[in-house]
Image (cartoon, rainbow, N blue to C red):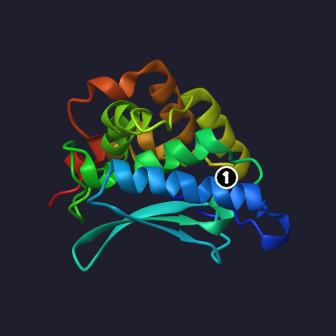
Amino acid sequence: MIFDRPQQPPEHQDRSTERLSSVARLVATFESSFSTVYYRVLESIKAVNAQASLANGRPLVDIFGGLAFHPAIRHDGLVFTLLHETGHHLSRGCKLPWAEMACECAADQWATTQGRAAVAANGASFRLDVALQEIELAAMPESPTVAPSTRCWSMNWQERRRALLDGRTLNLQSCEICGAIPR
């Protein structure tokens, strides 16, 4: 979920005992659901964001403190965000041209299908519409202008939101970004 500007200073974060416990339980659920992925909460980072990366070849998902403890982000937003980032590692969909991770649209598709089913089996269901609303409130994602050669809906928040809510992520044939950028 790369959002450019939003920061959440610690003094505005919800770091209550209940919230810390809730985040820890959710991370434990993800670790047991997807044992090949390593999860970290980077509490000191104020960015309202999360990211998937590889560390020494190991799949890693980081959720930043600005997102994990943002008062607008609740259970639904955290579950969807963690699923999306996990989807970058576990999706069998289109891969990014610059890394062996799934592109945004493939990560979203995985999050709303296989990922959703896996965490639901471990008691971590979520409501997609609520999750997207929480993310909007916290991150205020912009809808950047996308170059015509890369007209991927995932690069425009409003189009991405509609695609997710309309279920259009379920029938992906190819990734427009991956098709536009040569490997």
Between 146 and 27, the residue placed more toward the observer is 27
Q: Residue at x 74, y 65 (%)?
A: 8
With 153 as the anchor, is 182 left or right in this view?
A: left
The residue lying at 65 percent from left, 78 percent from top is: 44
Q: Is residue 163 above or below residue 52?
A: above
Q: How many marks?
A: 1
Query: Does any portion of residue 69 appear in the rendered image?
Result: no
Mark 1 residue crowding within 10 angstroms, few (<14) / some (14–19) / many (20+)? many
Relative image position of residue 102 (x, y in whole percent): 27, 51
- Amino acid at circle 1: Ala
Residue annotated with mark 1: 139
Which structural element holds mark 1? helix
Farthest residue to the left: give it. 183
| Residue 150 on image: x %, y % | 34, 45
83 relative position to 2: left or right: left
Inspect this view and state whether residue 115 appears: yes
Of residues 150 and 92, the one drawn nearer to the viewer in this rendering? 92
Q: Where on the picture, by quarter, is residue 112?
A: top left
Task: Give percent across and percent down for residue 85.
Answer: 41, 53
Instruction: Give the percent coordinates (x, y) of residue 166.
Output: 47, 19
The structure residue drawn at horizontal position 43% and vertical position 41%, both measured from the top left corner, is 154
Foreground residue among 17 and 117: 17
Residue ranking furthest to the top? 166
* Image point (32%, 38%), residue name: 110
The furthest residue to the right: 11
Horizontal side of residue 32 vs 12, given as left or right? left
Q: Quadrant of residue 11?
A: bottom right
Q: Is residue 115 above or below residue 177?
A: above
Q: Quadrant of the C terminus?
A: bottom left
